[in-house]
Image: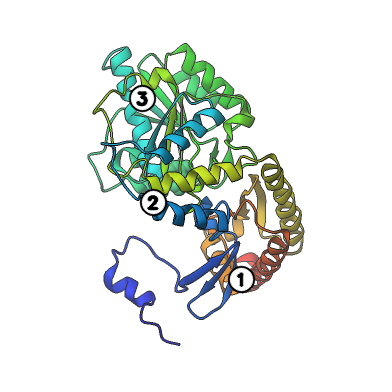
Amino acid sequence: MTHVFNRQTFDEVMMPNYAPSAVIPVRGEGSHLWDQDGRNYIDFAGGIAVNALGHCHPELVKVLTDQAKTLWHLSNVWTNEPALKLAQQLCQLTFADKVYFANSGAEANEAALKAARHWAVETFSADKHEIIAFNNAFHGRTLFTVSTGGQPKYSQGFGPTPGGITHLPYNDIDALDTRISHHTCAVIMEPIQGEAGIIPADHDFVRRARELCDENNALLIFDEIQTGVGRTGELYAYQKLGVTPDILTTAKALGGGFPIGAMLCNDQVASVMGIGTHGSTYGGNPLACSVASKVLDLVNDQKLLDGVRERHLLFMDNLDELNERCHLFHQIRGEGLLIGCELRDRWKGLARDLLVKAQEVGVMVLIAGPNVVRMAPSLIIPPEDIDEGLKRFGIAMAQFREEHSEESDA
Ligand SMILES: Cc1ncc(COP(=O)(O)O)c(C=O)c1O
């Protein structure tokens, strides 16, 4: 069947900075998607860890449509009830004293990095401006956040980039111990590096980072844009680590698919961010905040969070079993419903091929770097959808193995 809009339309009218699949999904329900030709897919991608409650969750649809009939937008010249309610929830559920609303993860991190710099300048001096970040980290695509991220490919060719940023090896206590000083204003890290390939932080590393920040009057920033809002089986990953940051950024799953980001911080940080220091026209938009408020209500539920851990075991057991048959993966790791399957050396660089194979047999997965297939499905994906999706993924694994048998024999 021909369609008015197709993949070719993308090439004609969209900036070529993405390489979307030829498949164009047109409808979603729970953990299922359907494309323009009515083909069904099980969704293990979850909009890159965004659709925490699946597609078109009836309670989110209701809250969004109710809000759409009431009030869409005001700007920050006036505050609004949904924003106040959501900020109050976030403060009650986390360490935060204050909240700043943005529209995306990168913007939440941009706010965090600016606030950290401003806090150091206002509280100490202008030469306390060093930001310590980690190799392979990902913090977004604004110029400050690509420069803070630890993957040079994202900032190369966009210089001059902001200075005063140091990158260290992740999980390396000695490197952090050696580098951090009274010139450091903040250390920023992901509790699990997502885009780098689902790499969890060692608990000792995080604990020591907190101590070193305290000793050097530096702020600790957790980027929980991928790990937050139930993804790991806790509302936020820091709650399990037992280490409290000064700033936490959250986005993605917070809106369940409606764009929103937030920077959560303690009073010491908030106190320097006076009138006019930062802002956003859309930040705190009533539509986004009313949806996010409902997402938090639904996710902050012990039964749902326990269900994430149960589903984790279901994924891990089944993936281990599939891997025993195909021997594709060197390691299957992750927490909750953020799972990475790292290809063995002989298939290095071929994760995208496996993603394409999976889509062909009706299951959507993601990659995290060239060697890791990533799964970040809905937190409430029904167990029967996990079974069916993994059955399809097993077929894709066998086909991939068959197709790349030459590499494996080499
Ligand atoms: C850990 C982390 N931080 C920041 C971002 C950027 O978020 P956004 O794409 O909403 O700007 C991402 C997105 O993948 C992320 O995974």
Q: Is residue 41 in view from this perspective?
A: yes
Q: Is residue 215 above or below residue 328?
A: above
CB of mark 3 near ligand 1 (< 8 Å): no
Give residue 70's mark.
2
Q: Secondary structure at mark 2?
A: loop
Specify which label sits upstream in the sequence, 3 or 2.
Answer: 2
Q: Is residue 312 above or below residue 13?
A: above
**Circle 3 is placed at which residue position?**
116
Between the C-alphas of marks 1 and 3, the distance is: 52 Å
Along the line of sight, the residue nearer the viewer: 92 or 239:
92
**Circle 1 is placed at which residue position?**
406
- Residue type highlighted by circle 3: Ala
Q: How is the image coloured?
A: rainbow
Give residue 268's mark.
none
- Residue type highlighted by circle 2: Thr
Q: Secondary structure at mark 1?
A: helix
CB of mark 2 near ligand 1 (< 8 Å): no
List x then y, in percent, for residue 312.
70, 49
Between the C-alphas of marks 3 and 2, the distance is: 36 Å
Quarter of the image where one finds residue 161:
top left
